[in-house]
Amino acid sequence: MKILRDTPDQLILSNTPWLIGLMLIGFILAFLGAGIFMASDGNKPVWFGILFAFFGGGMGAVIFCAMVRQVQVIMDRPSKTILIRRQSVFGYETVEHALSDLSHAEVETSRTSRRGSSSKVHRPVLILDKGMSAGRHPIVENYYSGRGAQRLVDAVNSWLPARKVDTDSQSA
């Protein structure tokens, strides 16, 4: 996830998982190509190649639909809103919250275990302390390693207390 805009009036965070999407498309195409090759080769039955392409490509397509989601968070002072936009293969969703309901952002950490070793993964979470949507609202569904979540949380928390300087006012 990256910061697209950081001005006194607006903070825009965006996550587009291009690398995962391209890798999954390559996975799907590899299984489809191998299945078509097996079906046309003649050494194996045609149905084997078709099943290989169907199940391998289908598994990649299911993972693609589950994992590839574009998320954009727009915090806007003039409109006093937070917009969370999510887009996936299945559709587009926008959730709106009042900016005044946002208390702060935190990093949510989970521990993963793999072959005897454990590591920590993180995701940024918006904390709404009042209003109809009070609670924890993850910006992204997946957890990631690295400092990206902390960088986003720091950007949100430093943007929140910032106030737009009124250039029309005069000091005495």
Image (cartoon, rainbow, N blue to C red):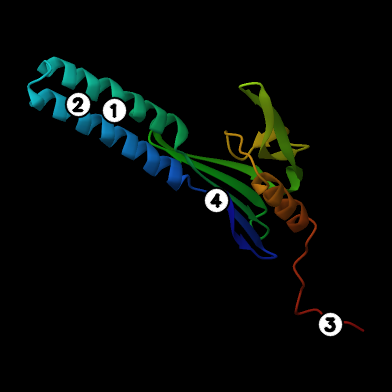
Q: Residue at x 34, y 29 (%)?
A: 61
Tag 2 and tag 1, C-beta contact below 8 Å: yes
Q: CA distance from mark 1 to mark 4?
A: 29 Å
Q: Which residue is mark 2?
A: 35
Circle number at residue 170: 3
Q: CA distance from mark 3 to mark 4?
A: 37 Å
Q: Which residue is mark 4?
A: 14
Q: Residue at x 12, y 23 (%)?
A: 39
Dot 4: few (<14), some (14–19), or many (≥20) neighbours within 10 Å? many
Tag 3 and tag 1, C-beta contact below 8 Å: no
Q: Secondary structure at mark 4?
A: strand
Residue type indicated by callout 3: Gln
Quadrant in the picture for residue 104 = top right
Dot 2: few (<14), some (14–19), or many (≥20) neighbours within 10 Å? many
Q: Which residue is mark 1?
A: 57
Q: Secondary structure at mark 1?
A: helix
Residue type indicated by callout 2: Gly
